[in-house]
Amino acid sequence: MSTTAVPELKQISREEAMRLGPGWSHSCHAMLYAANPGQLFGRIPMRFSVLMQMRFDGLLGFPGGFVDRRFWSLEDGLNRVLGLGLGGLRLTEADYLSSHLTEGPHRVVAHLYARQLTLEQLHAVEISAVHSRDHGLEVLGLVRVPLYTQKDRVGGFPNFLSNAFVSTAKYQLLFALKVLNMMPSEKLAEALAAATEKQKKALEKVLPASS
């Protein structure tokens, strides 16, 4: 199977992002993850559990949202949004991972934070999220990303990548898995290629029926 290059966006430093003018919007999101020693079906290593969420619009993304820099620091704004969707979890500047400029007509700089928890702490976040204010409204539920590929080379992570993601969320996931050494670059590229091929075949099946 051919590989697909992992997409890249323009990365800038936190300091550069803070110097951007008022024409730029800032989005802050958090990737919460934990090492997972479990095995699916007793033979497929889980390796890590990463949390993402299903949004009100049917798209997958990380917990977080836009931060109004006129009133909030990045971390205070992020924690305010997290409090609505996850509960009492608070992140700090020490959890900052990256900033990227997004493509398109809207001038947005996307900040990503990442914190490694224990598996027990991650499960506690999942339980707390069900009781948060936005659960069932703007947030339809947390999901764990399957960071494995089954023998058919599609089940697991490739299938997950075939879903619809909001804005830069898919890129941020791939970026974080790479820089945090959670998955080798070649495995990321293979999963992305399998997902792309699956979407292509699905489109080919639909087009004749609609013509």
Image (cartoon, helix red, strand yellow):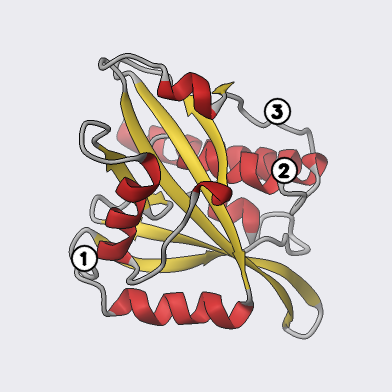
The circle on residue 89 is none
Q: Nearer the viewer, residue 189 or 90?
A: 90
The circle on residue 178 is 2
Q: Nearer the viewer, residue 132 or 21?
A: 21
Q: For residue 196, which quarter of the picture?
A: top right
Pick the quarter of the image with the C terminus: top left
The circle on residue 134 is 1
Q: Is residue 201 visible?
A: no
In contact (CB < 8 Å): disc 1 and disc 3: no
Between the residue at mark 3 and the residue at mark 2, the CA separation in whole angstroms equals: 13 Å
N-terminal of the two: label 1 or label 2?
1
Q: Residue 166: percent from the left, percent from the top?
A: 37, 41
> Does residue 107 appear to the left or right of 155 in the view shown?
left
In the rendered structure, which amino acid carries the disc numbered 2?
A: Lys
Q: Nearer the viewer, residue 159 or 33?
A: 33
Question: Which residue is rendered at x = 40% and y = 60% of the image?
Answer: 53
In contact (CB < 8 Å): disc 3 and disc 2: no
| Residue on which the image places disc 3 | 5
